[in-house]
Image: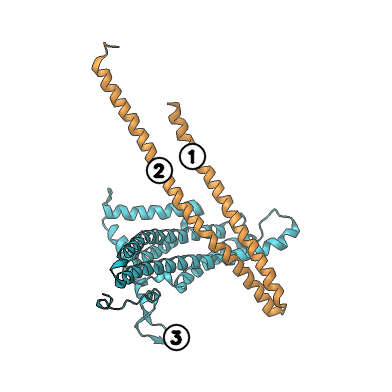
Amino acid sequence: MTFLLPSVEIDPIHQFKVTKWLDLNIGGVDLSFTNASGFMLLGVVLAIAFFGYAAQKGLLVPSRLQSMAEIGYGFVADMVRSAAGEEGLKFFPFVFTLFFFLFFANMMGMVPYAFTTTSHVIVTGALALLVISIVIGYGFYKNGLKFLKLFAPSGAPFLIYFLLVPIEVISFFARPLTLSLRLFANMLAGHIMLKLFAGFAVTLIGAGIVYIPVAILAFSMGVALNALEFLVAGLQAYVFAILTCVYLNDAMHPSH
Amino acid sequence: MSSEGPDDLGERIAKAKAAHEAREAEKWRKADQADEANISAGAYALRFGIEFAVSILVGGFFGWLIDYFAGTKPWGLLIGGCFGIAAGIRAIMRAYRELNAQALKLTQGQSAPTDGTEDE
């Protein structure tokens, strides 16, 4: 029985391999166009196409597509308003772009054979660094040196500051790290799990007829995990965006 | 009573129907709210494990940096790690306070309409 099937090799990490689509080397710097860049670009194009097409007619009574786009807009606007206040709405374009970039990247990752760009810590890390540099830059621009009050909340006894300031500094610098690690780890672990359960089902079928009931079990687990991964894909984009809002709020009002 | 006849009955049925529909709608609205609360609770829960671990790592890293430049070999790492643990606990405490405030707002928001329906 077994030799009828090609030997199934399960390599759950293989899906994360970055391959070069176009070799580019400018001034000794490797700027190759990889599958990661390709899928990021595709996500951007898809997002622009979706919103462009949905908003094209601008009907007073929205069509189905237009109302989807409007719900997305309202969702992000509410998120910014609740986490960063009315003042935070000046960052709405940034948060909106960030959220939908991540959302499209995560959702495209759910398509079989697609590449999940957010499962690479370099992508999420770059985004987190962008967020935190905007927070630091805007914080100093808006509040000047008062931004440093973020590290020294008022109203504590003098000696406590020797403990409090290092703690606050550590938790500030932990932010970009948590922001990037959370998204990256969730996507990586989720996709490995999916591959493992699906591969497990195939291997079990290959192992013989007796194992088919177990294979069905493994497969249904894979189906359930698939649903969970869709939830995680949406949720992680949401978490990333809302934490960005929270950090931006800190930049606007450092002395909380 | 009997003089009012079938008209009254129809009216009463309509009234009961409307009341029932209102009750159902209320139930759905509450379920929706609970769903939303669950999702955001899940989003919050996902934050903390990583936040705590990373705080310790960052604290340890800063301590290690001080060690590296000042040559105080194990002490910076140890003390930095302790500060990291403190930072992690502080992050969780802060989140706990935030969530408490949110839960308070949610229960207050929900108690207002239920009081109204009980009065009717």
Task: Report whether A91 appears left or right of A151.
Answer: left
* Mark 3 or mark 1, whichever is nearer to me: 1
- Chain where mark 1 sits: B
Is label 1 in a helix, a strand or a loop? helix
Dividing the picture into quadrants, the one containing residue B86 is bottom right
**Residues indicated by labels 3 and 1 sit on the same polypeptide chain:** no
Q: Which residue corresponds to mark 3?
A: A29
Q: Which residue corresponds to mark 1?
A: B109
Indicate the quadrant containing the N terminus of chain A: top left, top right, bottom left or bottom right: bottom left
Dividing the picture into quadrants, the one containing residue A218 is bottom left
Give the colour of chain A.
Answer: cyan
Task: Check disc 2 and give the amino acid type.
Answer: Ala
Q: Which residue corresponds to mark 2?
A: B31
Along the line of sight, which residue is nearer the eye, A194 or A79? A194
Query: From this viewpoint, which residue is outermost toward the right?
Result: A159
Dividing the picture into quadrants, the one containing residue A92 is bottom left
Residue plotted at (30% across, 29% down) = B17
- Chain where mark 2 sits: B
The chain displayed orange equals B
For the residues labelled 2 and 1, the Cα–Cα distance comes to 14 Å
Is label 3 in a helix, a strand or a loop? strand
Task: Report whether A254 appears left or right of A210.
Answer: right
On the question of residue A98 being in view, the answer is yes
Along the line of sight, which residue is nearer the eye, A26 or A117? A117
Indicate the quadrant containing the C terminus of chain A: top left, top right, bottom left or bottom right: bottom right
Would you place residue A158 above or below residue B71 in this image?
Answer: above
Q: Position of residue B116 (x, y in %)?
A: 45, 30
For the residues labelled 3 and 1, the Cα–Cα distance comes to 57 Å
Quick one: label 1, few (<14), some, or many (20+) residues within 10 Å? Answer: few
